[in-house]
Image (spheres, helix red, strand yellow):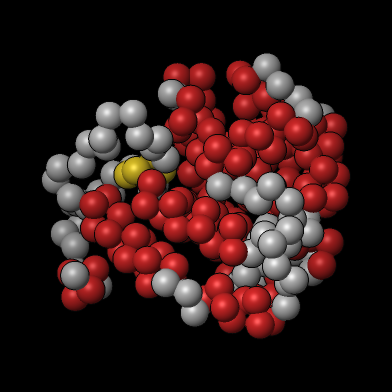
Amino acid sequence: MLPFFFGFLPTERMPKDVDMHMTVTVLRDLTRRADPRHTNRSAYTNWKVWHSGDTPRLLFALVDSHIESFSDKLQLPPRGRQTFISSWSSFCVTMGMYLTNVVELWNHGLPIERRLRYYTIRVLEDDIRNGYETLEHMDQETRYTWFWKAFVGSLTVAQAQSADYDERLDGMFDKFSKYIKAFTRVEKMSSWDEAKRILVTVVWPMECTQDEICTKVWARLLAKH
């Protein structure tokens, strides 16, 4: 499996959006392990999380979904099972942001190196912009997945700019604000509590150390003109 993953792909073969259900399932398990209601957050807690069986499961899920994104045939999900349709690349960068900025399991919750951060935010914004054009025509589960990526990206930009200002990201928060506002119009909602309930349907902690920051970022997103 791994040699295929790193192998050469024909230039004419383009990746397709895939169901990231397996990856989301593992992220939910990691989120529960990191829940401050059930454990005292510490370096030892992070060690326990990453030495659980979830780590190899996450790697397998990412490799498996990457292979599927280049497959000629996409597997149909079982009837009634929740789906999380996304491009593989945008989901992966959002996953990294989520593990860093929301549950703080990566990089001790600190912003990643600015060059890498700029690149990953650009990758995500490009995907979110493409989805923005068809937002009203998405099914609800796909729209919720799109929103999860958009809000995690917004939070990452806000936290990064406050900790390590990068002028290249000056207009990025405004773009995410436009996307989030479009989502609130489609869903006919506006409060952070409503937004959080939607995020939980993908993957989000019921409680986390970033709750206050998320509330402030949400208010900023909706206040932008």
Horizontal arrangement in the rendering, residue 168 relative to residue 120 (left or right): right
Q: Name the residue located 77 percent from the left edge and 34 percent from the top edge.
A: 192
Q: For this rendering, which residue is in front, 132 or 28?
A: 28
Residue 210, located in which quarter of the rendered image? bottom right
Left or right placement of residue 96 versus residue 24 in this view: right
Q: Where in the figure is residue 45, as x and y percent of width and height?
A: 65, 76
- Towards the viewer: 129 or 192: 192
Q: On the rendered image, what quadrant is the N terminus found in?
A: bottom left
Residue 38 at what x, y percent from top left?
Answer: 69, 62
Look at 32% across and 66% down and name the residue there: 60
Q: What residue appears at the point 72 percent right and 78 percent down from the top-left corner?
A: 42
- Examine the rendering and report whether any part of residue 7 can be seen: no
Residue 62 seen: yes
In the figure, residue 76 lies in which quadrant? Answer: top left
Q: Residue at 62% across / 27% down in the picture? A: 183
81 over 111 or under it: above or below: above
| Residue lying farthest to the front in this orientation | 38
* Left or right for 193, reference 6: right
Residue 202 in picture, x, y percent from top left:
53, 42
Pick the quarter of the image with the C terminus.
top right
Q: Position of residue 116 (x, y in %)?
A: 58, 70
Vertical side of 225 occupied by 117: above or below: below
**How many marks can you see?**
0
On the picture, is 223 further left or further right than 142?
Answer: right
Quick check: 111 above or below 197?
below
